[in-house]
Image (cartoon, rainbow, N blue to C red):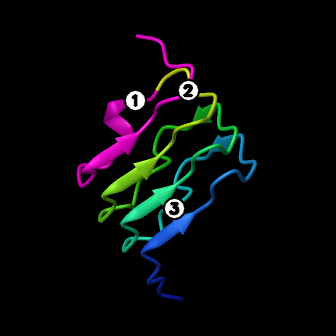
Amino acid sequence: YIKYNIYHIYLFAKYLGQVRTMAFHRLAHLTRLDLSACQISVIDSGAFDGLVAIQRLFLHGNHLSSISAIDLPPSLHGISVHDNRLVE
C-alpha cells in the first residue's frame, strides 16, 4: 500500500476528454487540482470522490455543458469554470 501525499496537481492543457469516477480517490491530501484546457467534455458522477481536502478546482477552458453541484466535494472553496459550454 502506497500512501500518496500529493497536494497540487497541474494538468493544464493535457488532453483528457473525460474525468472518470473516482479518478482521484487515493489523493486525500490534494488541495488544488488544475484540469483547465484539457478538452474535458464529461465528468462522471463521483469523479472527485475521495478528495476530502480539495480547496481549489480549475475546470476553465474545457468543453463542459454541465457540472453537477452534488458531485463537488464539500471542502471546495473555489471553482473556475469560465470558457466552457455551460447551459443554465
Name the magenta segment's main secondary structure.
Answer: loop
Residue 62 screen position, x and y as percent? 62, 34
Mark 1 crowdedness (10 Å alpha carbons): few <14, some 14-19, many ≥20: few
The residue mark sitting in front, 3 or 2, is 2
Q: Which residue is mark 2?
A: 84
First of labels 3, 2 by sequence position: 3
User: Residue at coordinates 69% horizontally, 50% vertically from top-left?
Assistant: 13
Secondary structure beneath disc 2? loop
The answer to the question of whether label 1 and label 2 lie on touching residues, with beta carbons closer than 8 A, is no
Mark 2 crowdedness (10 Å alpha carbons): few <14, some 14-19, many ≥20: some
Secondary structure beneath disc 1? loop
Which mark is on residue 24? 3
Residue 26 screen position, x and y as percent? 48, 71
The residue mark sitting in front, 1 or 2, is 2
Type of amino acid under label 3: Phe
- Stretch in magenta: 67-88
User: Residue at coordinates 48% horizontally, 82% vertically from top-left?
Assistant: 4
Mark 3 crowdedness (10 Å alpha carbons): few <14, some 14-19, many ≥20: some
User: Residue at coordinates 54% horizontally, 28% vertically from top-left?
Assistant: 83
Against 25, residue 35 (above or below) is above
Residue 72 screen position, x and y as percent? 35, 43
